[in-house]
Image (tube, helix red, strand yellow):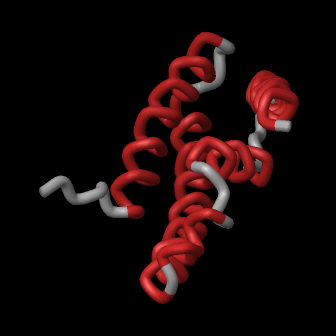
Amino acid sequence: MHRPKPVRDHYTESLAVNSENLVKQLAQAGVPEDESRRILYAISDSYLQQVERIVLECERDMMALEKAPSPLRLFVESIAKARPESQAAKELLHRYVAAWEDWMV
């Protein structure tokens, strides 16, 4: 019998893939590695806090997952909360969020 992937796993696997792609883009934009790590930490922290809320809600009511943001939307929302220091990082994150928000509408 096939068991669905746990909600937490679904979200954390998506975070790993999206973070890896973002780190590459930050490096290509010339963002220093230490700043990239701080940005990713802030994004991951925000993202994982939201995942815990989603998991708790789904444990109470599995139908709650239908109302939860997709992993990609949650990642983009977490990026929007990040406060990078360098202009290169600010511009990249702004473009990243704008592109995905346009696509997700």
The quadrant holding residue 104 is: top right
Q: Residue at x 59, y 26 (%)?
A: 32
Q: Is residue 42 left or right of residue 9?
A: right
Q: Position of residue 51 (x, y in %)?
A: 52, 66
- Seen in the picture, residue 18 relative to 54 is either above or below; the reply is above
In the rendered image, the residue lying farthest to the bottom is 60
| Quarter in which the N terminus is drawn | bottom left
Q: Residue at x 61, y 50 (%)?
A: 70
Residue at 80% across, 28% down: 103
Q: Position of residue 52 (x, y in %)?
A: 49, 74
In the displayed structure image, the side of residue 81 where residue 69 appears, left or right:
left
Q: Is residue 12 left or right of residue 31?
A: left
Residue 12: percent from left, percent from top: 41, 52
Taking 56 as reference, is 52 above or below it? above
Of 14 and 39, nearer the camera is 14
Q: Quadrant of the C terminus?
A: top right
Compared with 86, 26 (above or below) is above
